[in-house]
Image (cartoon, grey):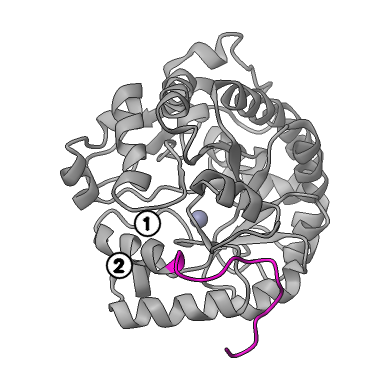
Amino acid sequence: MKPGEIFIDALYRRPVPRRATGSATSVVTVDLMQKVGVFFPEAHQDAEKMAALAAAGHTELGLDNVMPLFSVLHESSALGCKVDWGEVDRMPACREPLYKMGDEIEIPPDLLNRPGCKVPLDALKLLQERYGDEIAIVGKVFGPWTLGYHVFGVQEFLINTILDPGAVKGAMATLKEVTVRFANAQIEAGADALCLADHATSDLCSPDAYADFLKDVHAELNDRIRCPLILHICGDTSDRISYIRETGLACFHFDSKVPTPTARRLAGERLSLMGGTSNLDLIQNGTPEAIIEDLEEKVRWDIDIIGPECAVPLNAPYANIKLLAEEAKSYSGSGAGPQGDA
Ligand SMILES: [Zn+2]
């Protein structure tokens, strides 16, 4: 089986000949940019450079997928948010919110042709042409909760989940259409699977709020977007994995704040799991022995796709991701249930 087939089958928890390895979020580090000779911020804004840097996730690091949307602000920039595209060692940030809650959100008719969307769409096309036969090409969209943070500002958005939940739900219904349009355009451009990132982190969204505002939205996105979706939420999500499991999403990309056995127990046998490897303790600061010890725990608890928990810190050494990917491939495939203490 080719690496891309292993990745996609592992997303569905189908039997695979070896452990899959990959990431739904950025694996770019400063030393990887130096190795490839392509740098931020240009790689966010130029499709050729974006594709070249993303390809290194496979050619240099050995992952079974590539994912070119390194920043969180592509569709928000196309919506009109003013974006500071950052530096070689600093990720992009929103300069100021676009709306106040209650304002009517206008989705630009040329949304997908604006550079924020067009550059990653073109990069996905290039990656599909060059690597699509071999590896999985993964795109990324943001859900309406995160888009709400970007267009309203985090504080304005969150306070209104309490003061005016009807207005928040109305805004999310509009923003959800951005997620669907950008997702379907990425599939057309060549994405085999998509990361759906929605930052319903426990410190900013209670489990009740997840159930009230997001569970049905995520289930609807899963129905309307025709490729496997990998939900990414940072932080400790153990109080909401059982809800996520009911959305029908293929995979959950989890943070190391959820202990690995807890993640598998809550996800059950159908929802596949990706990530969970600590960025700070292992990818950035781990010894090879510590990385391998953690990998063994991931395999024991049948984590389907081995990789970092979230976008890797830009100052981490890429050698640690490469080591993790190489070692992961020496283990048998997932889907057989927890493998005891062997
Ligand atoms: Zn994250």
Pinpoint residue 201: horizontal percent, then vertical percent.
60, 59
Which numbered dot is residue 71? none
Q: Which residue is mark 1?
A: 312
Q: Nearer the viewer, residue 252 or 202?
A: 252
Q: Residue 291 falls in which quadrant of the image?
A: bottom left
What's the magenta region?
A: 328-342
Q: Secondary structure at mark 2?
A: helix
> Can residue 209 be spotted in the picture?
no
Q: Which residue is mark 2?
A: 284
Residue 329 within the segment the image draws in magenta: yes
Which quadrant, please, contains the C terminus?
Answer: bottom right
Establish if 182 lies above or below 256. Answer: above
> Can residue 266 be spotted in the picture?
yes
**Pointer 1: residues within 10 angstroms few (<14), some, or many (20+)?**
many
Establish if 99 lies above or below 15. Answer: above
Pinpoint residue 181: horizontal percent, then vertical percent.
66, 23
Disc nearer the start of the sequence (1/2):
2
Pinpoint residue 83: horizontal percent, then vertical percent.
38, 30
Q: Secondary structure at mark 1?
A: loop
State the CA–CA distance, disc 1 to disc 2: 8 Å
- Circles 1 and 2, Cβ within 8 Å, touching? The answer is yes
Q: Nearer the viewer, residue 102 or 38?
A: 38
**Pointer 2: residues within 10 angstroms few (<14), some, or many (20+)?**
some
Pinpoint residue 292: horizontal percent, then vertical percent.
39, 78
